[in-house]
Amino acid sequence: MDFVIISVIGVLFGCGTYLILQRHLLRVVVGLSLYSHGANLALMVSGGLTRGNPPLLTTEAPYVDPLPQALVLTAIVISFGMTAFATVLAFRVRQVYGSDVVDELAGGEE
């Protein structure tokens, strides 16, 4: 199970890297979103994947660390705000300049 999740994290970071290196702004925004999903999944895995254990230290039984869960919830809210802002910014750039290709915006036409 751990190998599958680690593989998914690798695929998310790989696809995110590929999309960030594209020329279109919307693809860059999607790449950043994939990065944040990969980071959230990595945080969840760092807390341990145990099913049915309490997230508190009330018993001597093994417990689940609640800190990564709290960090992931915070990261989800932050990444949602970042993605919404970047999407609106890319949309506005497309409206003003008529294109969302980074090379055309910088004036470096070759």
Image (tube, grey):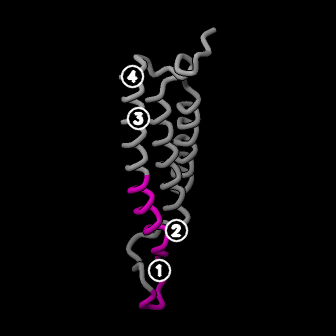
In the rendered image, which quarter contains the C terminus? top right
Q: Determine which residue is flagged by label 2.
A: 47
- Whole-Å distance between the Cαs marked 3 and 1? 43 Å
In contact (CB < 8 Å): disc 1 and disc 2: no
Which residue position is annotated with label 1?
63
Q: CA distance from mark 1 to mark 2?
A: 10 Å
**Figure check: 91 above or below 12:** above
Q: Residues within 10 Å of mark 3 (few under 14, many from 20)?
A: some
Residue at position x 52%, y 68% in the image: 47
The residue positioned farthest toward the bottom in the image shown: 59
Decide: few, some or many residues near mark 1? Use Cα within 10 Å; few <14, some 14-19, many ≥20. some
Query: Looking at the picture, how far across and down is residue 63, in whole percent?
Result: 47, 80
Which of labels 3 and 4 is toward the front?
A: 4
> Dot 4 lies on which element?
helix
Labels 2, 4: front one = 4
Q: Where 100 falls versus 57 (above or below)?
A: above
Between marks 2 and 3, how big is the CA–CA gap? 35 Å
User: What x and y, as percent, mark residue 33?
Assistant: 45, 42
Q: Mark on residue 96?
A: 4
Of labels 1 and 4, the one closer to you: 4
Q: Write the residue at 38% across / 74% down.
A: 52
How far apart marks 3 and 4 lie (CA) works out to 11 Å
